[in-house]
Structure formats: C-alpha cells, structure tokens
Amino acid sequence: MRVEQIMTRNARTCGPGDSLSVAARIMWETDCGCVPIVEKEEGGPRVIGMITDRDICMAGYTQGRPLSAIRVDSAMAKQLHTCRPTDSIEEALNILRTHQVRRLPVVDNGGRLVGMLSLADAAREAVREHGRKGREVTEAGIGEVLEAICVSRGPHGVAVAAR
C-alpha cells in the first residue's frame, strides 16, 4: 500500500508571513493540530515548514503578545520530515517513528505539497484492514509507532526512558 492511497488531499496551508491567529483559525476550522507552511511557486506550493497547535501556544506564552502580532515563521518548525505519495505506508510509519512526529507533509519531487499523512490516517487504515489476511497496517504496528513518538525527550532532544 502506498501513502497516496490513505493521505489527506487538499490540506489547508498558510505562509511564513501570516500571523499565528491565521494558523490557529485554520486548525480550528479543519479540526487538525498542524498546518504546513508553504511558499507559493509556479507548479504549486512548496513546503518550507510546519506549525502545530503546541508551537502556537508556546509562542504566545513565551512572547507575551497576541497571536495576531506574531508571525508564523517565528514559531514554525523549519526542519522538515516528508514522504512521497509513492512511498509505502511502512516507509512513512518509519519516518514518523524515527523523528517522533505525528504528521508528514506528502510532497512531490519538487517539494510541492500534494497531501498530508497522519498517524490517524494509518490508524483508520488498520481498522479498515482488521480481520483481513496479509494486512499492511495493523493496530499493533500503529501502537509501536505511537509508543516511539511519545517517548519523552530531554532538554537536548535526547529520548528519555519512561519510568
């Protein structure tokens, strides 16, 4: 099974110069926890970052300003982890596990956004496949990825074992 078979298409985006209130509104309206940050280019929007609801909250708290006064590029994650539409679900889940992220922008060869893949998308697929022989996505596999994602990271980004 390939990423393009279960990814969410037509993801809402915002730009680096938008305010955090724009990103928060998109999350509220679409019931999601992150928004890809894109630069408009010929051929489609190129992904340059991601912003999560937590990023927005922490920026508002640490900067002590209203969200409408804080630009997205001051709070977005610039280190991107992406996958391609033709990648296998197993490859994408490995990226999620390895980098401890819950969502991946799905990009073409030019880095242009074609969709989003979330751990929830994979979990829904595991439920659809439940009871079938030769399953590609299992509840146990999703649980293992979630466990790896949820390992606490210390102050230097190093995984800290649960107590």
Image: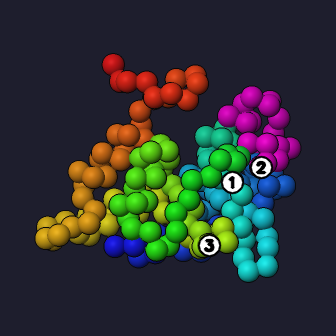
Graded by Cα atoms within 10 Å as few (under 14), some (14 to 19) or many (20 or more), the crowding at tag 1 reads many
Q: Main secondary structure of the magenta part?
A: helix
| Residue 73 x/y as whole percent | 79, 48
Mark identifier at residue 109: 3
Disc 1: which residue = 49
Left or right of 106 on screen, residue 135: left
Residue 125 highlighted magenta (yes or no): no
Count the marks. Answer: 3
Distance (Cα) linking label 2 and label 3: 25 Å
First in sequence: mark 1 vs mark 2: 1
Mark identifier at residue 20: none
Determine if residue 43 is in view. yes
Q: Element type at marker 3?
A: loop
Most distant residue in the front direction: 109
CB under 8 Å between discs 1 and 2? yes
User: What's under tag 3, amino acid-wise?
Assistant: Asn
User: What's under tag 1, amino acid-wise?
Assistant: Gly
Determine if residue 51 is in view. no
Residue 73 highlighted magenta (yes or no): yes
Task: Please identify, in this view, whether the residue under mark 2 or under mark 3 is nearer the observer.
Answer: 3
Residue at point 62% right, 47% down?
52
Most distant residue in the bottom direction: 43
Q: Quadrant of the N terminus?
A: bottom left
Residue at point 72% right, 76% down?
44
Mark identifier at residue 72: 2
Distance (Cα) linking label 1 and label 2: 10 Å
Picture quadrant where residue 69 is located: top right
| Residue 161 x/y as whole percent | 37, 24
| Residue 6 x/y as whole percent | 41, 71
Q: Which segment did they paint magenta?
A: 58-75
Left or right of 142 on screen, residue 16: right
